[in-house]
Amino acid sequence: MAQTRTYVVLLGVPGAGKGTQAQLLQQATGLPQISTGDLFRYNLKHQTELGRLAKRYMDAGNLVPDQVTIQMVADRLEQPDCTRGALLDGFPRNLLQAAALERLVAPYGGVASAPLIQVEDEETIRRITGRRTCRLCGAVYHLTFNPPRSPARCDNDGGELYQRDDDHEETVRNRLFVYYKQTAPLIGYYFAKGLLHEIDGARSIEEVQQELLALVKQP
Ligand code: AP5
Ligand code: ZN
């Protein structure tokens, strides 16, 4: 078998804080954050065929078809920054994607852990509707819970902060519906493998980060 790598699967409802925590974990561990949502948004911004295809599904809050999503992740995991592993944010999203990931990472020791960031639905709606994202570096803010130093500008690079097209309440409710129908079965899947770690996501960003960091750094 090839050398073991650390693959962490971040689970949680839309708006639970997966992206926020993955960005912090990336800074702390050097493992790259792989966000399928960000990869689709990058393709959309650069008007690729994949971006145009993904937009149809994302705007409605539905999942992009598995075949293209899995291929995109397989390609990303082959990049040179993934030789120690990766922080998977938003993938897998259903059991078929989980099985595909298992095949991809099996030669490197499989998935190391699957933390589930738990937050109530009403809180995620508050978090998502107040979220703002930097156009330049992708940093994630919240108008109340994690505000930028100057309004509408990123602390890192002064980039413009924008609201995602799929962050309106009606689309968010469908994203939650899709989560419970298609993604929630992953909780049982990773529990059965002894990889699930439930984390109380209702606490501050720093407290959640401390618990996740302890988990990811475990030998
Ligand atoms: P994606 O981009 O993955 O969106 P998501 O899963 O809905 O998750 P979010 O990015 O909305 O939330 P998050 O948990 O990362 O929260 P965040 O850290 O930003 O997917 C978008 C779409 O792409 C999907 O609908 C689908 O169409 C498609 N797609 C993506 N992956 C796919 C796949 N694998 N298969 C098929 N289709 C796929 O935090 C939210 C807000 O809360 C922020 O403002 C933040 O500042 C704030 N916050 C975070 N933590 C805290 C805290 N502890 N206290 C207070 N505020 C907090
Ligand atoms: Zn920025």
Image (cartoon, rainbow, N blue to C red):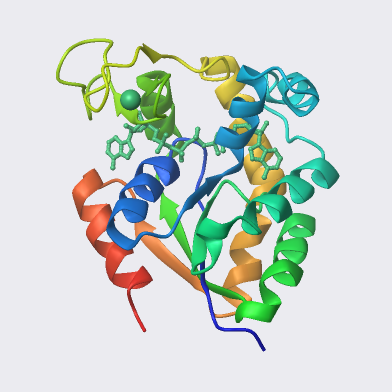
Residue 212 placement: quadrant: bottom left
Q: Which corner quadrant holds the C terminus? A: bottom left
| Above-or-below relation of 144 to 103 | above
Query: Do we see residue 10 in this rendering?
Result: no
Residue drawn at 21 percent across, 23 percent down: 147
Residue 98 x/y as whole percent:
71, 61
Residue drawn at 66 percent across, 71 percent down: 105
Q: Residue furthest bottom?
A: 1
Q: Quadrant of ligand 2?
A: top left
Residue drawn at 39 percent across, 29 percent down: 137
Q: Which corner quadrant holds the N terminus? A: bottom right
Residue drawn at 67 percent across, 58 percent down: 185
Residue 199 x/y as whole percent:
36, 60
Residue 187 placement: quadrant: bottom right
Residue 65 x/y as whole percent:
82, 38
**Viewer-nearest residue: 132 or 128:** 132
Describe residue 122's horizontal placement relative to residue 13 as left or right: left
Describe residue 103's horizontal placement relative to residue 131 as left or right: right
| Above-or-below relation of 80 to 170 | below
Q: Residue furthest right?
A: 67
Query: Do we see residue 135 in this rendering?
Result: yes
| Above-or-below relation of 181 to 32 | above
Describe residue 211's horizontal placement relative to residue 135 as left or right: left
**Viewer-nearest residue: 2 or 129:** 2
**Viewer-nearest residue: 41 or 202:** 41
